[in-house]
Image (spheres, rainbow, N blue to C red):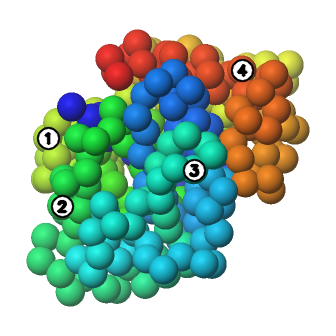
């Protein structure tokens, strides 16, 4: 039975998409069957996986609206060794178009039902906002992975996100859990990182993942080559960190 994990943070620039792509690649390298769902209108998870978002005949929006099936839209046999349900700028219309549908918060749940069991892990890259796309992801997910940069405003944004998770639990997805909080762009040499890190440990305890993702230029360069850093620079610090993250997630969630 597959595990569906939504990677979300309403704040942009925290390494959410980078973590989705590289966690997908790292899990695939550990012989897990992985589907990456690109639910962000920016389409960066698709591009970072080697898919040209401008050349898509069908996207995840068509699947959400019932105009295509997930099975027919998933891109397979990619060099990254995981499958992708791609997205692009068409998703900007989703907020309006989903409003006219019955059970609009469950469109992704319905779409994934027929394909999820083909995978060990389904990762959903959410948009950097708490909109209807994110609600769909949280409704479909078993758990939430929250990438978080160690900065002063991190806790404030995290609080709003956790409130949303709690609302989803109470309304449509009572089994939704927090898989973990992932510290990204981590630099323990700075006093700010150390201070925020202590606050996170004190407040969240075991929800804070042991793995941290360091600031690393190779991680930043990899998307322009259309591959995860685990392929672009497999021996870099960033690549090694994502492999450690994959192993921690396997242990934590029994993937």
Measured as percent of width and height from the top left, residue 248 is found at: 49, 16
Q: Mark 4 — residue? A: 240
The residues tagged by marks 4 and 1 sit, at their Cα atoms, a distance apart of 35 Å
The residues tagged by marks 4 and 2 sit, at their Cα atoms, a distance apart of 35 Å
Where disc 1 sits, the SS reads loop
User: Which one is in front in this view, the residue at disc 3 or the one at disc 1?
Assistant: 3
**Residue 110: mark:** 2
Name which quarter of the figure residue 67 lies in: bottom left
Residue at (79% x, 38% y) in the render: 232
Q: Which comes before the other along the chain, label 3 or label 4? A: 3
The residues tagged by marks 2 and 1 sit, at their Cα atoms, a distance apart of 17 Å
How packed mark 4 is, by other alpha carbons closer than 10 Å (few <14, some 14-19, many 20 or more), is some
Q: Which comes before the other along the chain, label 2 or label 1? A: 2
Marks 4 and 1 close (CB-CB < 8 Å): no
**Residue 207: mark:** none
Measured as percent of width and height from the top left, residue 179 is found at: 38, 29
The residues tagged by marks 3 and 4 sit, at their Cα atoms, a distance apart of 22 Å
Question: Where 114 falls versus 34 (above or below)?
Answer: below
Left or right of 239 on screen, residue 10: left
The residues tagged by marks 3 and 2 sit, at their Cα atoms, a distance apart of 25 Å
Q: Which comes before the other along the chain, label 3 or label 2? A: 3
User: Which one is in front in this view, the residue at disc 2 or the one at disc 1?
Assistant: 2
Q: Mark 1 — residue? A: 174
User: Which one is in front in this view, the residue at disc 3 or the one at disc 4?
Assistant: 3
Left or right of 102 on screen, residue 73: right
Measured as percent of width and height from the top left, residue 217 is found at: 87, 38
Where disc 2 sits, the SS reads helix
Residue at (47% x, 49% y) in the render: 83
Marks 3 and 2 close (CB-CB < 8 Å): no
Q: Mark 3 — residue? A: 78
Q: Nearer the viewer, residue 206 or 6?
A: 6
């Amino acid at each position: 039975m597959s595990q569906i994990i939504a990677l979300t943070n309403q704040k942009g620039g925290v390494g959410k998409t980078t973590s989705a792509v590289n966690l997908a690649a790292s899990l695939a390298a550990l012989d897990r069957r992985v589907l990456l769902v690109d639910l962000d209108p920016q389409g960066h998870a698709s591009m970072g996986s080697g898919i040209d978002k401008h050349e898509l005949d069908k996207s995840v929006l068509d699947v959400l609206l019932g105009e295509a099936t997930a099975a027919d839209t998933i891109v397979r046999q990619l060099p990254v060794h995981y499958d992708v349900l791609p997205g692009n700028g068409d998703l900007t219309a989703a907020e309006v178009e989903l409003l006219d549908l019955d059970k609009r918060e469950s469109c992704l749940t319905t779409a994934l039902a027929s394909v999820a069991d083909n995978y060990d892990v389904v990762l959903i890259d959410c948009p950097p906002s708490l909109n209807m796309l994110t609600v769909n992801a949280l409704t479909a997910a078993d758990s939430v992975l929250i990438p978080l940069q160690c900065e002063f405003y991190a806790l404030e944004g995290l609080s709003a996100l956790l409130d949303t998770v709690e609302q989803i639990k109470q309304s449509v997805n009572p089994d939704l859990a927090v898989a973990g909080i992932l510290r990204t762009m981590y630099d323990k040499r700075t006093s700010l990182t150390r201070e925020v890190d202590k606050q996170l440990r004190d407040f969240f305890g075991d929800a804070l993942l042991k793995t941290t993702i360091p600031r690393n230029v190779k991680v930043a360069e990899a998307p322009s080559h259309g591959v995860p850093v685990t392929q672009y620079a497999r021996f870099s610090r960033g690549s090694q960190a994502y492999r450690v993250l994959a192993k921690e997630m396997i242990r934590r969630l029994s993937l």
